Amino acid sequence: MSAGHAQEGTSITPPSSSLHKDTITTHVSTTLNQRTAQLDNLALLPPDTEIFCTIPNLPEFTNTFITTRWSQILHLDEDTLNNLKNTVSQSGITSVTVATGVRSSRNIAQFLSIYVRLVRSREQIDAHMRLYEDKLDPDQPPVINDAYYAEEDRWIDETLLPILEDLIVIPVPNVLAVFDLSPERAAKVRMIFESSGQNIEGLIPEYFRNRGCKYTEGTFSGRFWKGIRFDGKTLAQYVQKNSPPHYQEMFRRLNKRETYLLATMQGDKLIVSLCDDPDKDLKIAKTPQESILSTDKVSMINTIPDKKYNLLFHIDQQFHEALTTQLRAFPGTDRISSIVPTPLTDVILHTSGNLLAKCQASPVSGIIWQDQGIHALLSYGKDHALKDTQATIDQIHATIDSLHGSITPGEHETHLHFHLKTE
């Protein structure tokens, strides 16, 4: 049974027995209708979606985040919080759902691994140049400084070039985002979408047009889309003119790259897709019965049927497996903590490291709601997959004041419940 499996009596998958068939069918239909009413954006996601996160009321979620201790935990200053609130208010976005399709988990894990390598390499370059700088005589002529920059360029080429080569060839994750817009914002977006392709192309800055971004349109998954096609060959030709000779071969790998950023409208919903091949990757569920709502991936909603949730997410097992494989491929990944030297970063890094070491690969589901504080309930899949978790929770308690956690082993999954007091 997968993570966050529905409780007995709420499963939308009928048992194999034909007994009480009419009752079961009615119950399944009712449950699906309830889910569709609560999670209508998810009705657009295909059942093979690997990762999703949905926030049904973005302004309310933002206000909760700003006015409670969540913002204090992240050490955000007042200006940052005000900018966040204003940005959400001015965007006209009332809810947001982001999801990834088949094989995207592997691509995201590869990207995270490359990002960690990039950070570590940058640290190595900075450390080397600090040692090299100590050897320089400030009274020497400027040519010495030229030698310094030449040495820095050499190290950049040696350490960053292999990483950039991997970054160029990694496939783009197949991402689908659904935004509910206010009527006013939806009307403005619809005007842009309904204008001619020539007008839309005129909105693309010349900087990006010169680097391979062109207007495109087409019918995919039964819908008409407009957007931008990124042509790697055009970018390769542009950057090769201004790059050192030893970079030429790397940029030639861009010749076969194509990426699409497409959009369509459904009522006041803006649907956006990022993918390499829309004919193959762009999928929209035709009905709720054919969507992710008919799977156990959304069954965490059944844990609080009488409450209004703030956030719901699911991460499939493929991501856990891919991320574990990538991070175990090289040591010292904890050095990434230098990016944001805050207590929360250390908690996340150590907690994720502990879980990767102690857990079997399983899907993870989670839901956040507010009720005399903020609650986060996580459900982790397989039997006995999560071991020695109390040490991790104790570590979180020691770092984040007022955050309390508990573990509830289920028959087929483990529940972790965190409660952040807001008084």
Image (cartoon, helix red, strand yellow):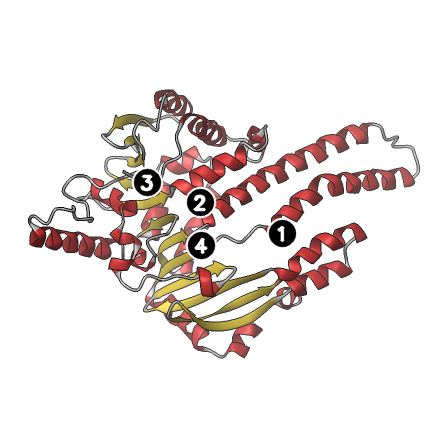
Q: Which residue is mark 3?
A: 365
> Does residue 231 show up?
yes
Helix, strand or loop status at disc 2: helix
Among the two numbered marks 3 and 2 on one chain, the one whose residue lies closer to the N terminus: 2
Q: CA–CA distance between discs 1 and 3? A: 32 Å
Helix, strand or loop status at disc 4: helix
What's the amino acid at mark 4? Thr
Among the two numbered marks 4 and 3 on one chain, the one whose residue lies closer to the N terminus: 4
Q: Quadrant of the N terminus?
A: top left
What's the amino acid at mark 2? Leu
Among the two numbered marks 1 and 4 on one chain, the one whose residue lies closer to the N terminus: 4
Helix, strand or loop status at disc 1: helix
Query: CB of mark 2 within 8 Å of CB of mark 1?
Result: no
Q: Which residue is mark 2?
A: 81
Q: Return the mark for residue 87.
A: 4
Q: Badge 3: few (under 14), some or many (20 or more) residues near its Cα, within 10 Å?
A: many
Query: CB of mark 1 within 8 Å of CB of mark 3?
Result: no
What's the amino acid at mark 3? Ser
